[in-house]
């Protein structure tokens, strides 16, 4: 290849649909949040197969790469993040999962986690507070030592996925495409207005390659890892890729591409509007996109 050769930019290199730019009559980048605890999304997060667990397993195996969202659009993958960094939770998150620093005068219930000198301990039984109570390291019968205050991200910490997609109307084929580009791993964060935060992003193109590989494995257990569980007909086997292609999930719009790069919540916050109003605005934006599609059909 010539030293002057450049990468092909006729279409988005991170896209699966590969719709050429000159064929796109209409395109908007949309961010949606898929709540994995929602009943409609149970097929993505069942006991037999969980997309959250699959992502963590593939990251641990080195099959996926993680990206941040501080440089440009997250779905452009300009900010590479080390997988080990992405999977290691910060001290603030660990602290939020505990009852805070150990206090000898405080009562604790069995199962409560507390912090003492940088280590996390779990109460084995109910503990009654008293000034003379021994420290957790000195009372192994009362407290289980869980080790240093570090935590590796697990699928149990993931409450949802932030789906980033390009909504494209292909003027040559006269149809609308939902071109999924990236997934963001969403964790609970009580300090934010939305009660959640995106930890890192992965490429949907990379994920789809691994899902396809596992779906064609000779090992039934490997194939089971990527199966979307059909509530009404379990024998109808569909992979996670099929489920996203067929839109067998529910995701609430979080952001529609705009010059300020504001989420709907941020737009309402900046104008002193309530969180409740922003919730209705998300559904209104969904209707606007549907109306836009309807108008394009008349083109």
Image: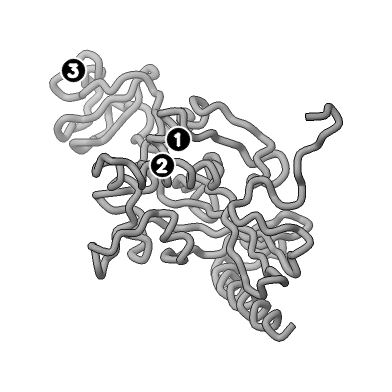
The mark nearer the N terminus, 3 or 2, is 3
State the SS at label 2.
helix
At label 3, counting other C-alpha atoms closer than 10 Å, the crowd grade (few under 14, some 14-19, many 20 or more) is few
- Locate the N terminus and report the quarter of the image it occupies: top right
How far is the residue under mark 1 from the one under mark 3?
26 Å
Q: In this view, does 127 lie to the left or right of 222?
A: left
Question: In this orientation, which residue lies closer to the viewer: 27 or 127?
Answer: 27
Comparing 298 with 164, the one in front is 298
Q: Which of marks 1 and 2 is nearer the N terminus?
A: 1
Q: Distance between the residues labelled 1 and 2?
A: 34 Å
Residue hosting label 1 = 93
- Label 3 residue SS: loop
Q: Residue at position x 72%, y 72% from top?
A: 171
- Secondary element type, mark 1: helix
Residue 104 position in % (x across, y down)? 27, 25
Residue 141 is labelled as none
Q: Of 225 and 31, which appears nearest the observer?
A: 225
Q: Which residue lies furthest to the right in this view?
A: 4
Question: In the current view of this chain or complex, which residue is farthest to the bottom?
Answer: 298
Q: Which of 136 and 22 is in front in this view?
A: 22
Residue labelled with disc 2: 213
Disc nearer the start of the sequence (1/3)? 1
Rendering coords of residue 220 (x, y %): 24, 44
Residue in the image at 86% along x and 31% along y: 4
In the picture, the quarter occupied by the C terminus is bottom right
Residue wearing tag 3: 139
Horizontal and vertical percent position of residue 8 = 75, 44
Residue pictured at 39% horizontal, 19% vertical: 118
């Amino acid at each position: 290849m010539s030293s002057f050769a450049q990468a092909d930019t006729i279409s988005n290199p991170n896209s699966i649909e590969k719709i050429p730019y000159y064929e796109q009559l209409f395109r908007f980048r949309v961010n949606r949040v898929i709540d994995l605890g929602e009943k409609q999304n149970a097929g993505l997060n069942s006991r037999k197969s969980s997309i959250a667990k699959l992502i963590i397993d593939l990251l641990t195996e080195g099959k996926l790469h993680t990206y941040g969202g501080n440089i440009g659009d997250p779905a452009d993958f300009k900010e590479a993040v080390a997988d080990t960094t992405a999977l290691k939770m910060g001290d603030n998150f660990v602290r939020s999962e505990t009852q805070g620093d150990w206090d000898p005068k405080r009562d604790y219930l069995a199962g409560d986690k507390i912090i003492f000198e940088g280590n996390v301990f779990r109460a084995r039984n109910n503990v009654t507070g008293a000034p003379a109570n021994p420290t957790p390291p000195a009372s192994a019968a009362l407290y289980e030592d869980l080790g240093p205050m570090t935590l590796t991200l697990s699928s149990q910490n993931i409450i949802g996925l932030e789906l980033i997609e390009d909504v494209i109307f292909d003027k040559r084929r006269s149809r609308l495409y939902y071109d999924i580009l990236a997934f963001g791993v969403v964790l609970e964060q009580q300090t934010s207005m939305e009660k959640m935060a995106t930890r890192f992003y992965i490429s949907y193109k990379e994920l789809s390659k691994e899902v396809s590989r596992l779906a064609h494995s000779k090992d039934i257990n490997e194939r089971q890892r990527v199966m979307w569980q059909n509530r009404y007909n379990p024998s109808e086997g569909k992979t996670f890729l099929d489920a996203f292609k067929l839109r067998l999930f529910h995701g609430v719009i979080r952001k529609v591409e705009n010059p300020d790069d504001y989420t709907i919540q941020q737009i309402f916050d900046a104008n002193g509007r309530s969180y409740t109003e922003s919730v209705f605005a998300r559904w209104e934006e969904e209707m606007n996109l549907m109306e836009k599609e309807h108008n394009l059909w008349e083109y």
